[in-house]
Amino acid sequence: MKMVEEEVVIVGAGIAGLATAVALQRLEIRALVLEKFPCLRASGSAITLFPNALLALDALGVAHKLTSLYDPTESGFVTNVETGATQETPFAGNTATGLGVGPRYVHRKTLLEVLAGELQTGSIRFSSHIDAIETQSLEGSTIPIIHLSDGTIIKSKILIGCDGVHSMVARWLGLGTPVNTGRSCVLGLSVFPDGHGLKQEVRQFVAVGRRAGFVPLNDKETYWFLNCIFSPKEIMRAEPEVIQRELLENYAKDFPEIYKDMIRHSDQSKLIWVPLTFRCPWGIAFGKLRKGNITVAGDAMHPMTPDLGHGGCAALEDAVVLGRHIGNSIIRNGGLVPGAIAEDLDGYVEERKWRVTWLAAGSYLSGWIQQGGSNWWMKILRNVFYNFLFPKLLSVIKHDCGKLPVVPFSSQVDPKKIE
């Protein structure tokens, strides 16, 4: 049995976990990231970075490494497959930031690699499986003790769960299991060796019970998706070529040829079909998001449907806000003092919970309306949504989560150790 002491332990080397580790490193705090897989692993091919996410990445000091690789998307088009009517939605980014006027669609793996590349060697411990989490009283606070399957025991001042939708840390806090929405999503990456010749625009297609779309990532690759009413598990778990055939022959058979061409050019190694789950808004707003010096971020806190494209964006915001509250604690207390951390983690929770509650609710509502039935009142509601409500929902992209504080180096000299 090996006992290890760490300042901060982060569970999960996804977007939230790596971004939080980068934020803490900017504050001169080394965080140990525990990842259960043997390497960085991206779930899905791409992620949407709206201006609010780019502001968060700018606060982390890495936005330029992505904006130099991916062009902003200026507008989106939604076509009703039944009528052929098309609605255009210009993306209203914050041009004052200089980070682009619209969202950028980037490879998830590239984002993870950029974040991981900022961390010191040894910051990520791969193939780390947690058997149990317990706490120990210290100076009026409770600090986490993490037991790994290889017998290692880690004592830390702070534990941050960034371990995704099925978070072990969230379960330990008592947060409920994410709810199945009754819908599912297919995600794919199309490759055109000779180039696709598309404009940098988002194209979406809506039919009863289905919503699909695609957007270029670069000159030769496009990211595409299809959301639909829940599908049989045997189809979702089938081999990629079976999924591809099922989509072309059934789920997308009445969609335009340009969309079906995306499916035909899919990189089958990137093709996945997953159920859509989310945490009920009241579970976020009134759930236990902090206990002792343990909290959660990203999908561990607020799993949401992808209908607003904001799960990853919110995770990046979480990292900056959490880093700011921890940094302010260091400034006030001259170091990372276990007994003073809980109050600052509460500050993080209070700042984040209402925004992510709204995002989770808005995402679910957006998906429900867009993929609703074909009766007359649903059609009217859908028209109202695209003409009036959807532009209002997009206002979330203007949010600025703020900057990280500047922590004097002297604040981290001889920090108070865990006894």
Image: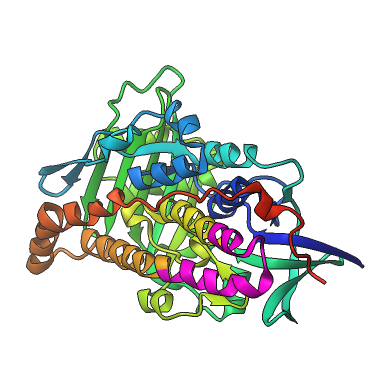
In the image, is 278 to the left or to the right of 91? right
Where does residue 358 sit, x and y in percent of width and height? 31, 66
Majority secondary structure of magenta residues: helix
Q: Is residue 244 visible?
A: no
The answer to which quarter of the image holds residue 170 is bottom right
Q: Residue at x 41, y 49 (%)?
A: 246
Q: Residue at x 37, y 46 (%)?
A: 225
- Total labels: the figure holds 0
Q: Give the left or right position of residue 368, taking residue 125 as reference.
A: left
Q: Is residue 348 magenta?
A: yes
Q: Does residue 329 appear anywhere in the picture?
A: yes
Q: Quadrant of the N terminus?
A: bottom right
Above or below 361: residue 269: above
Q: Residue visible at 32% across and 21% down? A: 197
81 and 40: which is toward the camera: 40
Q: Which corner quadrant holds the C terminus?
A: bottom right
Q: Which region shows up in magenta?
A: 327-350
In the image, taking residue 32 as reference, residue 341 lies left or right, namely left
Q: How far across and how far down the image is residue 11, in percent?
A: 65, 61
Magenta-colored stretch includes residue 49: no
Residue 15, given in percent of the width and then of the height, sits at 54, 50
Question: 239 or 28: which is nearer to us?
Answer: 28
Residue at the image position 62 percent from the left and 78 percent from the top: 292
Q: Looking at the picture, tell me which residue is in the foreground, 324 or 317.
A: 324
